[in-house]
Image (cartoon, grey):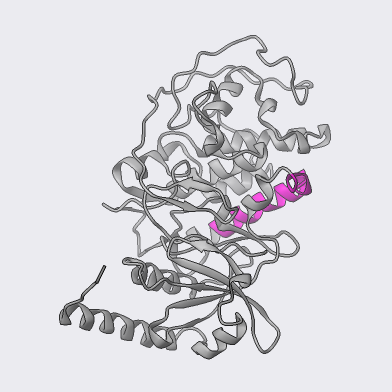
Amino acid sequence: MTISFTKQEILASFIKMKSLVLYLESEIPFFNFENMVIATDNFDGANKLGQGGFGPVYKGKLLDGREIAVKRLSRSSGQGIEEFKNEVAVISKLQHRNLVRLIGYCTEREEKMLIYEYMPNKSLDAFLFDPTKQALLDWRKRFHIIEGICRGLLYLHRDSRLKIIHRDLKASNILLDKELNPKISDFGMARIFGGDEDQANTRRVVGTYGYMSPEYAMEGRFSEKSDVFSFGVLLLEIVGGRRNSSFNHHEESLSLLSYAWKLWNEDNILDLVDSTICDPCFQTEVLRCIHVGLLCVQEFPKDRPTVSTILSMLSSEIATLPTPKQPAFTARLISSTTDSSPHRLCSMNDTNFSALSGTTLSHIGEVVHGTIGSSSGEMENRLSVSLEAYPIGK
């Protein structure tokens, strides 16, 4: 198959690349192509960390000894240049301990590469959803990760010079350093808000099915509260040790949100908790996190807390939490006053939750197209092709 380009298309591509180079030269360090060849052993397959939506990612080592992760944009990626420019534009202006650090870039020989700090512990999903590694994340570590993600998100929304909506927050986009400190990554789909802007619309909905808020998935509206929804799903995954997408049609609940809401209404919410962290010493803190997670995934944006409020809730600065309403994308559930699960992982010692009835939202069937491997090697349903977080580790 032969692909041909018009002179106008070639010229437009050249102008885009030239403007990108001029922008980058004023912002972040440049690495020449030879440096990247040496660092990655000529992009040896043995150094390949994974395959993202727009190309492969390689582990490398600079001449000064620093380990790096090189995201190499595929030349066949039709939409890649815009996401590449967007990721550079966003992350080059950010400095926070809970955000992945961009070291430099390379645009020689028509290449487009981003050079990141290397993370030896891969991404959160590589630990959280792996039965052999799951137990390494005890509750103290998980709560530390939850707080770190929240602080990174607060920086994006309120504390940096910019107001940034991530739009693709999920477990595979949370990287872990050698101390298991979380770092938010993959800013290819992020949007910068200016001035008093607090909401935007798009016709091109991008992100990962299961983490997207209803107003974004169905109407293309996104805001801080759409990131909050994604954080809520992630929080429930961290507590439960199970992917939102891991449920199937043979199970009574079709999603983690449906399952959590069912258990909440049955006063049986501790059945949600991953058995490896079911320690009575942390029961109150775990329950508070579940409560906060349910507040984050409520159907309507106005009902969800802001990230600053979430941090106050997690630290118990806000002692009394509001009652959550029914999560988005959950079918009507019939509340039961009986304990339908005789094999409970924990007991609810002196803890009681009232049965709740929330706003009903019919379960919505999504039309999804395209699948891309996550950093843990599993396939995820995607509504649109987007940059994947690089999987950092071997």
- Where the C terminus falls, by quadrant? bottom right
Vertical arrangement, residue 159 with respect to residue 199, above or below: below
Residue at the far top: name it.
338
User: In this orientation, which residue lies closer to the viewer: 340 or 61?
Assistant: 61
Q: Is residue 291 left or right of residue 161?
A: right
Magenta residue span? 132-153
Vertical arrangement, residue 49 with respect to residue 297, above or below: below
Q: Main secondary structure of the magenta part?
A: helix
Residue 367's x, y, as percent?
33, 39
Residue 4's x, y, as percent?
21, 75
Residue 330's x, y, as percent?
45, 27
Per the image, is 171 magenta?
Answer: no
Q: Quadrant of residue 148?
A: bottom right
User: In this orientation, which residue lies closer to the viewer: 342 or 356?
Assistant: 342
Q: Residue at x 41, y 58 (%)?
A: 386
Residue 123's x, y, as percent?
63, 57
The answer to whether residue 30 of the structure is visible from this angle is: no
Q: Residue at x 55, y 84 (%)?
A: 36
Vertical arrangement, residue 293 with respect to residue 350, above or below: below
Q: Is residue 373 left or right of residue 316?
A: left
The number of numbered discs placed on residues in the rendered structure image is 0
- Where the N terminus falls, by quadrant? bottom left
Q: Residue at x 56, y 26 (%)?
A: 259
Per the image, is 134 magenta?
Answer: yes
The answer to whether residue 387 of the structure is visible from this angle is: yes
